[in-house]
Amino acid sequence: MKPSRSLLAASLAGLLALSAAGAHAQRPELYVDRAPPPPRHERVPPPRAGYQWSPGYWQWQNNRHVWHAGSWVRERQGQRYANPSWTQRDGRWQFKRGGWDRGDVDHDGVPNALDPDQTPIQK
């Protein structure tokens, strides 16, 4: 039996709402058993007004590490950018997505209200 168009439309609307809220929603943590390869050497372009360079990183996709080249990210006044990173934890590797932090967060890309580790702010 095919799902009705109204059911499909409602499901799509729900996904779009979740996507729009994604900037403020907690993203699931990613753990893998394989260490990422060493970072690739990238030539950093000259400074660009109003932008910050975010270096490339290894991302886990389709059961393997895939390189994502560095890119410029538009600066946000009063915020600090945390680069994506891998950390070894309990014999596995944890990926933390990069992102912007306001002053009320601990500079790991996740607002403290949504952060499971609640790392204290270092001043």
Image (cartoon, helix red, strand yellow):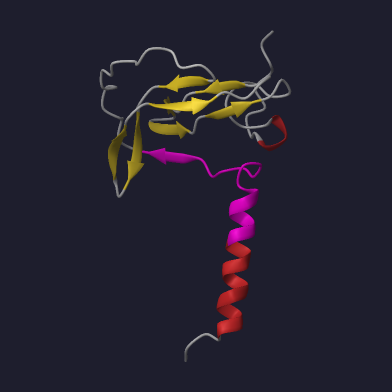
Tell whether 54 sits left or right of 119: left
Residue segment shown in magenta: 16-32
Residue placed most toward the observer, 66 or 35: 66
- Pick the residue in front: 34 or 41: 41
18 with respect to 72 (left or right): right
Residue 57 at x, y percent in the picture: 35, 28
Front residue (pair 33, 44): 44
The percent coordinates of residue 101 (x first, y second) are: 63, 25
Verify whether residue 120 appears in magenta. no
Report the number of discs: 0
Of the 4 image quadrants, the one containing the C terminus is: top right
Residue shown at 62% from the left, 29% from the top: 117
Apparent side of residue 98 relative to residue 22 in the rendered image (left or right): left
Residue 53 to residue 117: above or below: above
- Residue extending farthest to the top is 123
Residue at 44% over, 33% down: 95
The quarter of the displayed image where residue 53 is located = top left
User: Residue extending furthest front?
Assistant: 49
Q: Is residue 16 left or right of residue 55?
A: right
Q: Position of residue 33 (x, y in %)?
A: 33, 37
| Residue 110 in picture, x, y percent from top left | 62, 32
Residue 47, placed above or below residue 56 = above
> In the figure, residue 87 lies in which quadrant?
top left
Name the residue nearer the viewer: 89 or 16: 16
Q: Quadrant of residue 37?
A: top left
